[in-house]
Image (spheres, rainbow, N blue to C red):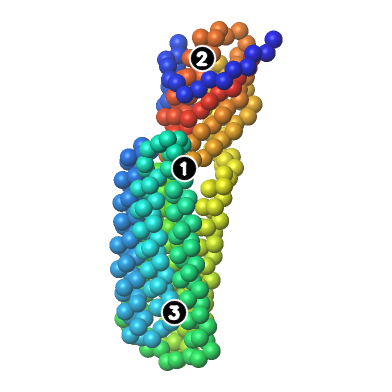
């Protein structure tokens, strides 16, 4: 006769326990306080770097009269605003569970990502208007060596920022940091377009400043829409990553008490708190105490390696 039970949320020793270090799977999380401190530091880095780049480009753009350089400077200013949202998002997401939010505040990061996208899109509309005006009524642009130097420094700085974001996000796994990393990479391409327009204008006298500004707008708008849809999808409960489910399945089957993982119902409440309802078949003949200890041990393993609070539904 089949026997079905649900067990979870406790940890205990097993007669021959499955060690948390056994599975050959990448560790899925870092501690909440450490994640907050690293995320906050990354946000401060992005805020300061983008403010410096923005001020430099806006000054040089105003002196040269280049709409494209000014547009790139405003883009960096929106990036600085985004970094500020990253700081706020990480601070809220790090808050502990409470009576009104029993699953924590981790999804604040997803809301922050949507706010960042909204800010960027507002800036895009203003930049598009200025670029179109520049195409219809072009004005002389003075691309000095100072402009070229600032643009080269900006390209290098943005490439370094993208590397730092991606490096940090290997552990943080944050949608906010991921959006910032993609934005920095797109900025490398955007500023390269502006630099090419400046070189062309300086060497040939052909003014494509307005066109370059529109190219900047298209790149930035694409990143804003992509970041918004990613954050919205996560907030609405996007299906779990197949790699994540495979990692959970492998961890569970490391315990010899389980013969099959029938299904996994995964719920993402942010990187700090995730839940999984796991349906498994138990090896026939095991006693109730052995089954309970196997489940509790695997629950602890999932918590340690994947930051997942698991509940098991099982039968023989």
Provide the secondary structure element on which disc 1 rests: loop
Q: Earlier in the sequence, mark 1 or mark 3?
A: 3
Identified at 43% across, 58% down, the residue is 180
| Earlier-in-chain disc, 2 versus 3 | 3
User: Measured from the top left, where is residue 202 in percent x and y?
Assistant: 41, 87
How far is disc 1 from disc 3 in space, using C-alphas?
A: 38 Å
- Does 9 sit above or below residue 44? above
Q: Residue 298's x, y, as percent?
A: 49, 22
Is there any visible trace of residue 141 in the rendered image?
A: yes
Name the residue beneath numbered marker 1.
270
Q: Residues within 10 Å of mark 2 (few under 14, many from 20)?
A: many
* Viewer-side label of 1, 3: 1
Q: Residue 222: horizontal and vertical position, in percent?
A: 54, 65
C-alpha separation, residue under disc 1 versus residue under disc 2: 28 Å
Task: Identify the disc placed on residue 55.
Answer: none
Residue at 46% x, 36% y is 103
Whether residue 132 is situated above or below residue 189 in the rendered picture: below
State the CA–CA distance, disc 2 to disc 3: 65 Å
Name the residue carrying label 2: 292
Q: Residues within 10 Å of mark 3 (few under 14, many from 20)?
A: many
Dot 2 falls on a residue whose secondary structure is: helix
Q: Is residue 178 visible?
A: no
Q: Which residue is mark 3?
A: 68
The residue lying at 48 percent from left, 90 percent from top is: 138
Quadrant hosting residue 188 = bottom left
State the residue in front, 304 or 313.
Answer: 313
Mark 1 or mark 2: whose residue is earlier in sequence: 1
On the picture, is 137 further left or further right than 56? right
Rendered position, 198 above or below 43: below
Callout in the foreground (2, 3):
2
């Amino acid at each position: 006769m089949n026997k079905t039970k649900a067990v979870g949320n406790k940890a205990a020793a097993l007669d021959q326990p499955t060690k948390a270090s056994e599975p050959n799977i990448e560790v899925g999380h870092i501690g909440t306080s450490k994640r907050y401190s690293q995320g906050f530091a990354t946000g401060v880095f992005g805020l300061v770097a983008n403010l410096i780049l923005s001020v430099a480009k806006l000054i040089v753009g105003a002196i040269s009269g280049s709409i494209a350089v000014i547009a790139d400077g405003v883009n960096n200013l929106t990036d600085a605003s985004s970094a500020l949202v990253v700081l706020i998002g990480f601070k809220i997401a790090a808050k502990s569970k409470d009576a009104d939010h029993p699953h924590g505040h981790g999804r604040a990061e997803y809301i922050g990502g949507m706010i960042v996208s909204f800010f960027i899109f507002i800036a895009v509309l203003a930049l598009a208007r200025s670029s179109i005006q520049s195409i219809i009524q072009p004005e002389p642009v003075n691309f000095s060596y100072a402009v070229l130097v600032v643009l080269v420094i900006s390209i290098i700085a943005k490439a370094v920022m993208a590397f730092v974001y991606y490096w940090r996000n290997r552990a943080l796994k944050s949608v906010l940091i991921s959006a910032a990393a993609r934005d920095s990479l797109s900025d490398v391409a955007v500023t390269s377009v502006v630099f090419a327009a400046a070189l062309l204008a300086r060497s040939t006298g052909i003014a494509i400043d307005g066109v370059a500004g529109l190219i900047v707008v298209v790149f930035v708008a694409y990143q804003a829409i992509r970041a918004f849809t990613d954050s919205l999808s996560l907030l609405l409960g996007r299906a779990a990553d197949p790699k994540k489910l495979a990692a959970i399945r492998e961890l569970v089957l490391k315990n010899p008490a389980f013969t099959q993982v029938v299904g996994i119902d995964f719920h993402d409440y942010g990187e700090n708190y995730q839940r999984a309802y796991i349906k498994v078949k138990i090896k026939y003949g095991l006693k109730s105490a052995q089954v309970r200890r196997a489940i509790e041990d695997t629950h602890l393993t999932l918590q340690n390696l994947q930051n997942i609070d698991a509940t098991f539904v099982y039968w023989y």
